[in-house]
């Protein structure tokens, strides 16, 4: 297995030279975090064993959401929170895809375009839910943004995991729908108009030629659990698994090869490209700081936790959880006796790093 940090160390200089114009603060932060993650250059923590008094100096993980090593625990916590919100209804997975003509706009105005993409997808399903003859109420959905295709090209789309159910605030009724939710062609037409209006409101200049037909998919996913696992898999741990990086050989013109599963044929294929281009392919999916990739809407919003609990009580449904889900972050185990170690100090400078100079009181700074 080839570590992504190794690829960065090998091709970072080439990447910075070729793509200097697109290297913003978020991508630079991601480069540095992944490159130093759990290495001797990272900040360290001191862990002590209460049983045998063993002390160890352990490098910190970077915690960056684009790092393939980090945030496994956060992913499990997210999955557990979403499982607690599951309601007794058939679930559907809706996918709203940004057309190719708007992807350059997303590349240069990511915060505005992705925010509008979330809002337009939710507004579309909320409108259909209110107008549906069976539902006639407020919808609930979990939305997750994906920005990549399986080939790792820029391919922004939003997945909505939505129960076929609604709440009618006036009549206080819970309605459900099974088998078929909404027509995907009608969803695409409304989504197109809603998103274009939102982008114009953001002051963005739209391209002259836009397709009349957009892509929206809607399919049943049973009780929703497998769909949550699928979305959680790509939510926190970057866009590529290190096991899929097959080669990073400087002797072959600095090429990097990785494997992926073709969406059409289902076959495993290999893509090879220069190392700098590979890093650009990865880093173009780094989101602007503070932009949330996962959002809850309607009666699945965090403010509606009490309502979900009431539904479970009234309908006599126990919240679904998995016994293997960790409620507490795993502890470091002592290499001598195997007992859990206690962290006694964090964020220490790496060994060998020069200490920061201590300011001298009253000293003047030369200008």
Image (tube, helix red, strand yellow):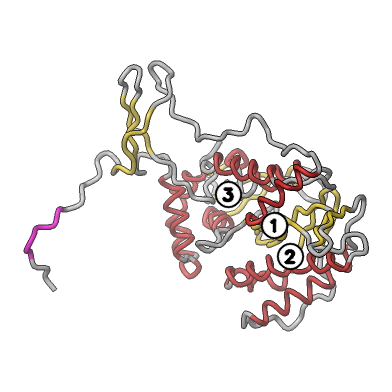
Q: Which tag, 2 or 1, sits closer to the chain's start?
A: 2
Q: Crowding at label 1, few (<14), some or many (≥20) Cα neighbours within 10 Å?
A: many
Residue drawn at x 21%, y 47% is 354
The numbered dot on residue 143 is: 1
* Residue 359 inside the magenta-drawn segment: yes
Q: Crowding at label 3, few (<14), some or many (≥20) Cα neighbours within 10 Å?
A: many
Q: Are marks 3 and 1 in contact (CB under 8 Å)?
A: no
Q: Which tag, 2 or 3, sits closer to the chain's start?
A: 2
Q: In which quadrant is the C terminus drawn?
A: bottom left
Question: What segment is highlighted magenta in the picture?
Answer: 358-363
Q: Image quadrant of residue 17?
A: bottom left
* Residue 360 inside the magenta-drawn segment: yes
Q: Residue furthest left?
A: 362
Percent x, y of residue 291: 56, 62
Q: CA distance from mark 2 to mark 3?
A: 25 Å
Q: Crowding at label 2, few (<14), some or many (≥20) Cα neighbours within 10 Å?
A: many
Residue located beneath label 2 in the image: 122
Residue located beneath label 3 in the image: 238
Q: What secondary structure is marked by label 2? A: helix
């Amino acid at each position: 297995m080839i570590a992504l940090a190794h690829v960065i160390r090998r091709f970072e200089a080439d990447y910075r030279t070729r793509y200097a114009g697109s290297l913003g603060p978020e991508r630079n932060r991601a480069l540095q975090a992944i490159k130093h993650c759990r290495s001797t250059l990272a900040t360290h923590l001191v862990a002590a064993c209460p049983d045998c008094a063993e002390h160890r100096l352990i490098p910190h993980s970077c915690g960056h959401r684009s790092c393939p090593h980090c945030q496994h625990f956060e992913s499990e916590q997210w999955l557990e929170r979403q499982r607690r919100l599951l309601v007794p209804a058939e679930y559907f997975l809706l996918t709203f895809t940004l057309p190719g003509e708007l992807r350059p706009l997303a590349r240069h105005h990511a915060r505005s375009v992705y925010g509008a993409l979330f809002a337009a997808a939710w507004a579309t399903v909320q409108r259909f839910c209110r107008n549906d003859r069976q539902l006639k109420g407020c919808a609930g959905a979990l939305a997750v943004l994906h920005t990549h295709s399986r080939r790792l090209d820029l391919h922004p789309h939003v997945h909505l995991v939505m129960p076929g159910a609604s709440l009618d605030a006036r009549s206080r009724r819970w309605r459900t729908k099974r088998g078929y939710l909404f027509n995907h062609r009608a969803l695409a037409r409304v989504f197109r108009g809603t998103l274009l209006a939102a982008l114009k409101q953001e002051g963005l200049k739209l391209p002259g030629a836009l397709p009349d037909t957009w892509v929206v998919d809607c399919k049943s996913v049973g009780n929703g659990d497998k769909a949550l696992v699928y979305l959680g898999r790509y939510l926190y741990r970057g866009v590529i698994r290190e096991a899929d990086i097959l080669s990073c050989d400087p002797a072959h013109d600095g090429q990097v090869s990785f494997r992926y599963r073709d969406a059409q044929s289902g076959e495993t294929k290999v893509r090879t490209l220069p190392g700098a281009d590979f890093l650009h392919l990865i880093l173009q999916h780094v989101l602007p700081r503070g932009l949330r990739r996962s959002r809850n809407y309607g009666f699945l919003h965090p403010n509606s936790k009490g309502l979900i609990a009431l539904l479970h009580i009234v309908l006599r449904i126990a919240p679904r959880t998995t016994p293997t889900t960790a409620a507490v972050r795993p502890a470091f185990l002592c290499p001598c006796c195997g007992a859990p170690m206690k962290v006694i100090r964090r964020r220490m400078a790496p060994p060998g790093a020069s200490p920061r100079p201590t300011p001298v009181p009253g000293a003047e700074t030369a200008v």
